[in-house]
Amino acid sequence: MQAYCVKCREKVDMQNPEAITMKNGKPATRGVCPKCGTKVFRIGKAA
């Protein structure tokens, strides 16, 4: 799954994607950028 890395300023394929639920109850996916190691985040249900 792709997410936008703020540090690299580009879309990357996230490593270790983890399905989470935000405080408001909506689904999201959290992972790590393979290039710089920064946490990346994508709102919406994971595929």
Image: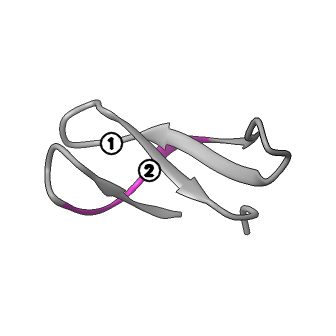
Residue at the (28%, 51%) spot, across then down: 5
Look at label 2 and name its amino acid: Met
Horizontal relation, residue 32 to residue 25: left or right: left
Q: Is residue 23 left or right of residue 4?
A: right
* Apparent side of residue 22 relative to residue 42 in the rendered image (left or right): right
Give neighbour class at mark 2: few <14, some 14-19, many 20+ (Cα, 10 Å).
many
Q: Is residue 10 left or right of residue 25?
A: left
Q: Which residue is mark 2?
A: 14
Q: Is residue 32 magenta?
A: no
Q: Residue at x 68, y 51 (%)?
A: 28
Whole-number angstrom distance, CA of label 2 to CA of label 1: 5 Å
**Residue 38 sits in which quadrant?**
top left
What is the x, y in percent for residue 26? 80, 53
Q: Are marks 2 and 1 in contact (CB under 8 Å)?
A: yes
The quarter in which the C terminus is drawn is bottom right
Q: Which residue is the site of mark 1?
A: 33
Given the image, on which type of amino acid does mark 1 rest? Cys
Report the magenta stretch's main SS.
strand
Residue 17 position in % (x across, y down): 59, 44
- Residue 30 placement (x, y as % from top left): 57, 41
Q: Secondary structure at mark 1?
A: loop
Residue placed most toward the observer, 28 or 17: 28
Instruction: Point out residue 22 in the picture as x, y percentages from the top left corner.
Output: 73, 40
Looking at the image, residue 30 lies above or below residue 38: below
Q: Secondary structure at mark 2?
A: loop
Q: Earlier in the sequence, mark 2 or mark 1?
A: 2
Q: In this orientation, which residue lies closer to the viewer: 39 or 25?
A: 25
Q: Nearer the viewer, residue 12 or 24?
A: 24
Residue farthest toward the right in the current orientation of the protein: 25
Mark 1: few/some/many CA within 10 Å (<14, 14-19, 20+): many
Q: Which residues are magenta?
A: 10-17
Furthest toward the front, the residue is 24
